[in-house]
Amino acid sequence: MLGKRGAPCPHPWAALHRAGLINRVLAPSNRRLFGDRCPPISLSCFQTPRRIPYSEAIGQEFRPAKVGDSFGPTWETCWFKVELSIPPAWAGREVHFVWESDGEGMVWRDAQPVQGLTKEGEKTSYILTRSMKEPEPHSLTLYVELACNGLFGAGKGSMIAPPDPDRRFTLSKAELVVFNRDVYELLMDLEILLDMAQLLGEENQRSFQALYTANQMVNVCDVMDPSTFPAARDLAAAIFSQRNGESQHTIHAVGHCHIDSAWLWPYEETIRKCARSWVTVVRLMECNPELTFACSQAQQFEWVRSWYPGLYAQVQDFVAKGQFVPVGGTWVEMDGNLPSGESMVRQFLQGQRFFQEQFGRICSEFWLPDTFGYSAQLPQLMRGCGIRRFLTQKLSWNLVNAFPHHTFFWEGIDGSRVLTHFPPGDSYGMHGRVEEMLKTVKNNKDKGRVNHSAFLFGFGDGGGGPTQKMLDRMKRMTDTDGLPRVQISTPDRLFSALEKESSQLCTWVGELFLELHNGTYTTQAQIKKGNRECERILHDVEVLSTLAVARGGAFQYPASQLQRLWRLLLLNQFHDVLPGSCIQLVVEDALQYYAEIRRAGARLQEEAVQSLCRELLQPKAGNTESTLVLNTLPWERTEVISRTGPAGTETLGMSNLGVAHIPEFLTGAETTNKEILCLSLPWGGFTDVRFLLWTLSYFKLSLNCVPGGCCANQFALFDDVPLYWDAWDVMDYHLETRKPVTTLLKPLEITLAGGLRGSASFSLQIGESSTLTQEIILDATCPYLRFLTQVEWKEAHKFLKVEFPVQVRSTNATYEIQFGHLQRPTHWNTSWDWARFEVWAHKWLDLSEHGFGVALLNDCKYGASAHGNILSLSLLRAPKSPDAMADITHHQFTYAVMPHLGSFQDAGVIQCAYNLNFPLHVVPASSARCPPWSAFSVSSPAVVLETVKQASPRGRTVVVRLYEAHGSTLVAWLQTSLPVQEAVLCDLLERPAAQGRLPLEQRGLRLSFTPFRVLSILLVLRQ
Ligand SMILES: [Zn+2]
């Protein structure tokens, strides 16, 4: 087809000519990439099941090893000692140490990590010298630390399958080679030209020009004669330097390496992944001063700082030069749906503080490219943390609807807006290829509105990062007619360009819902429970410790312990841990971290309570035994509590299955059991339990909440077999397999017959081998019916839900999210509606019509749905990948149903859900009765005082955070009995606002709210 010195035939051309050129020049040139070779003088190894430091490793006994040997099993580490001697005849040549093996390698030289090596990440060379000089030492010793896992762990059979515990890892190459860079450059030229020829299309003359140029290059070039290469390269340079017109699209290429903080490998391996990836980036930056690299997750910086101080110092240098660019502002790239509002604030607070301390500046972009949906509260939280820009791409994974924008303003539930960009190539792991550049331009849904887009290049997920090849491809595409302009850029330069062009951009209001991975609201229920419980524990420790400090005495706020515990909690919110899409090893680590927070949190809480209530807890002569109750929520609570008396008394009573019977049950309730007490409590206070108050006023409902013929609290089991992403996905077709759970193991039995508390219990058989036991509890004064549930869960690919059909008609249901709520449809009119067949909520969801509604509360569940008039709570799943044992264990959780008159706001659903999640603290005391004491009160039930903590690093300054929870505009007064001398509004990073001083008035602090506004205030206390 294409003879030497001949003209190419016009048709059919591209594929055939490309193949011809590959045969004639690429294949032989590839063989010529490496010249002379030389084996190491000696190779020895030592293997360990632990991840140990270099200093420990080199003191071990190394045994002889050879190429072809295999090592393992999975998760072990092999340390290789490699003695090398470069032949003097290679003077003037570029010499590489080539290492090819399974597993992930790190080269150490002179006690420092110098190069990450992974076949999967196209990194198999450590460059010893660019041009071997005579005085350089020809002999050296390297160590290679080889982790027995791949970039993507060790899945057996498929990437996301549970790890194969017995995998072996083979060393296939270890040698010195002469690298022929001129051959490499020629190959890069030809690759770009051939891609242009093939991808620009027959209608584009540039594709023909590229093909003809490649053909001419082959004609002038003799692969055996390097002196012919320059002429060939000149031909390529000529076409690459033909410029675009001014209108051409600009691609901002930014080096990147998405490293999941734990996923198909444990946290500990991620520490090494960071080091392997970043040291490689540092090496590339030394040779490519233009290279930029966007790097997120303060936790990963902290890991490298602690474990690799030498490497960290180099990273700091490149941060100072503006090449290594910290982004994101958060502690980890967290899940975007499930963390509480306060947790999300702490992600930014811990992250931005770290970046400020370490690098002298906070991040200006939120960076969350791989997370499974984005809460509609995030724009306000970003703005409160010094961020106006957001980058992600995950919505390109939507299964049903294509998201209509790549660059747009995203507006949250409070009206805050952030400039948002999805790289139009729909990836954060580009390789700098022509194809990807063309896709980026073609795919961009905001053509005409903006002419700049991001292009994140580098191996990712399991680490890896950019390669020299990626950079060299893009150097050739800087400004080449027919291709988009490609600049190595930074997130700041990209967003600055987009901001200039933003006048025509569209706005997307509300959540960025990912139409995929909706099983992650439910998978790994123990992790979900750990998250919710530990959020509560840290909240309570902060409240009680702050009050203990404010009340005086020697109590020290446990700032550093709290920081440590918060960081553990935030780490577990990583976007493959809290969603439950990780391997068993990660689950074990996560549960251990939660156990640590529970343990240390209980101790800190005990210390704070001891200090706060000290004189009331100390026995005094003549005092009778009493009980103190502490309330960490900002409103009065009237609740039945149980305390364990001398005889170990527990609550006793009865209740009835079904919402409709609540009023009948309550008739005739009496105080019969002295150990069951009912209190009216002020916020932040405590009182003597002999003040008994109780009321049934909430229960003046005469409506039947459940439609005739329907059963509430109905368990249903579904087949749950996703297409691929087992732990992640629940597909809409699971809904067709619904089977009501009806097999009673133990019929309903009254366990407490009345008085202040009534309860009943029963057991069910679920599926073939699982069982469920439930205690249904109704307390006097409590407007909701609680379901204490225990499940022995041994299923495979099943999905357990509980359903409440309710006598309510509404086209929208309301779901609690971070610091607020939003509505989603109860119908499936459009594809956007039915794609949300499974959604997430925090502590409650509600279906209301005018004047009446039913809310479903929970203490650790997140998956939910409301279709028609059925409210469902998703309880348990049983995926088998990547953790074959996911959720196969004992579970305990509580949910509650709350019928109400009026709106959910007026009925106090929000407060009730808090009450369910934040039980009163009941402390035995030996004190005389004391008057109730309240630290804070808020004048409006629409405003929730969520957070009370010490500001850091300010000694006697308290931060309080409040939000408007009803979706209303109002003025509220915050009153406090703390000795406040000054109050200043601040942002979420606790930085005082300009003109933020609040006057201290008789009624307290006057606060103006708009719907869902979050306000933080610094309260400076008198000494
Ligand atoms: Zn990820």
Image: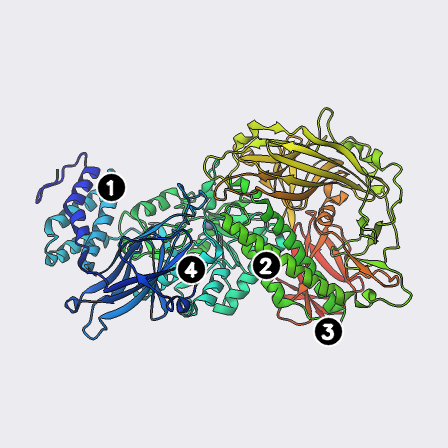
Mark pair 3, 1: CA separation? 76 Å
Mark 3 lies within 8 Å of ligand 1 (Cβ measured) = no
Q: What is the distance, in whole Å, between disc 4 and disc 3 at their CAs?
A: 43 Å
Quarter in which the C terminus is drawn: bottom right
- Earlier sequence position, callout 4 versus callout 3: 4
Give the amino acid type for the residue marked by disc 4 in the picture. Answer: Arg
Expressed as whole percent of the image width and height from the top left, the position of residue 113 reads 37, 66
Q: Is mark 1 within 8 Å of ligand 1?
A: no
Q: Which residue is mark 4?
A: 272
Viewer-nearest residue: 7 or 3: 3
Q: Nearer the viewer, mark 4 or mark 2?
A: 4
Earlier residue among tags 2 and 3? 2
Residue 88 appears left or right of 598: left
Q: Amino acid at mark 2?
A: Arg
Q: Quadrant of the N terminus?
A: top left
The image shows residue 233 at horizontal and vertical percentages of 17, 55
The residue labelled by disc 1 is 198
Instruction: Tell me the distance, in whole angstroms, between the alpha carbons under discs 4 and 1.
Output: 40 Å
